Amino acid sequence: MPTPHIAAAPGDFAPAVLMPGDPRRAQRIAEQLMPDARLVNDVRGMLGYTGTVDGKPLSVMGSGMGQPSATIYATELFREYGVQRIIRVGTAGGISPKVKVGDVLVGLGAHTDSAMNQHRIPGINFSAVASFELAEAAVRAAREQGIDRYHVGTIVSRDHFYLKVPGQTEALGAYGVLGVEMEAAALYGVAAELGRQALTVLTVSDHLLDGSQDMSAEERETTFQGALSLAVAAALSE
Ligand SMILES: O=P(O)(O)O[C@H]1O[C@H](CO)[C@@H](O)[C@H]1O
Ligand SMILES: O=c1cc[nH]c(=O)[nH]1
């Protein structure tokens, strides 16, 4: 059963996996949510844990940064470990003027400048969309938990973190794009390919068009809790 990138035994992963980009964040999430968490993968330092939350099995594993890395882990988890749903939980740069640092974004759809989905369906520009059921569960949880600073809509998954195409961010903002990150479009592509569910829930860590809002490293950790609780609710939803 071990894959080229995951050395876990059959049954080591729960049907639902939370997937932050950072493997150390996967460790912190596992420690926070699951006193019974056990390490199930550490190949390449991409830490993966499985335990239970309120008696329900849950796994947490890093994806690494960028769409190729996220695609490798999502494909192996779906294909080889029977995973049914992956909820990416991470950070984003704000783009829409409506969005403030610390807000939570639920990524219903992900535009991309990447070629990762370009050749999936011959002659077609693939639409990278989240699972409606998971998005609905996350929004329900936001309402129930009184988290009011959340937005549901499109995000953009860019390959470059630093290279900026002149005018692109402003144009994305004009189309109502909420924020930028680097994995969702590919994750949604893999889920569509393999008939599984995926969602992305993000904390806005900085704003690309309003630098005055940026957060300290400590603030990033504390404000991460809202996105995490929505991601857990989606992961464990019926
Ligand atoms: O906070 P995470 O989940 O790592 O996500 C964002 O942060 C990384 C860039 O700093 C990229 O992976 C981007 O998608
Ligand atoms: O600006 C940002 C912040 C988080 N993640 C990104 O990809 N970009």
Image (spheres, rainbow, N blue to C red):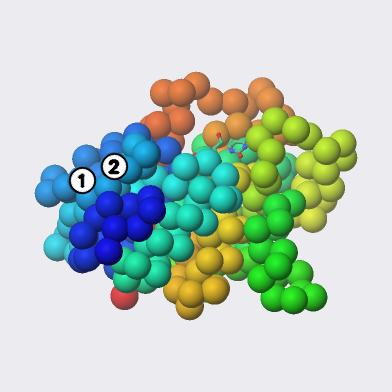
Q: Amino acid at mark 1?
A: Leu
The answer to whether the residue labelled 2 contacts the one labelled 1, judged by CB atoms less than 8 Å apart, is: yes
Q: Is residue 29 above or below residue 117?
A: above
Residue designated by label 2 = 42
Tell me, yes or no, if residue 222 can be seen here: yes
Q: Is residue 29 above or below residue 151?
A: above
Is 146 on the left or on the right of 205, as rendered? left
Question: What is the CA distance from the residue labelled 2 to the residue labelled 1?
Answer: 8 Å
Query: Residue 111, which numbered label?
Result: none
Q: Position of residue 176 (x, y in %)?
A: 74, 54
Residue designated by label 1 = 39
Q: Amino acid at mark 2?
A: Asp
Q: Residue at x 65, y 58 (%)?
A: 116
Tell me the crowding category of disc 2: few under 14, some 14 to 19, or many 20 or more residues within 10 angstroms, Cα based: some
Secondary structure beneath label 2: loop
Tell me the crowding category of disc 1: few under 14, some 14 to 19, or many 20 or more residues within 10 angstroms, Cα based: some
Quarter the C terminus occupies: bottom left
Secondary structure beneath label 1: strand
Residue sitting nearer the eye, 122 or 89:
122
Residue sitting nearer the eye, 35 or 146:
35
Q: Residue at x 34, y 37 (%)?
A: 45
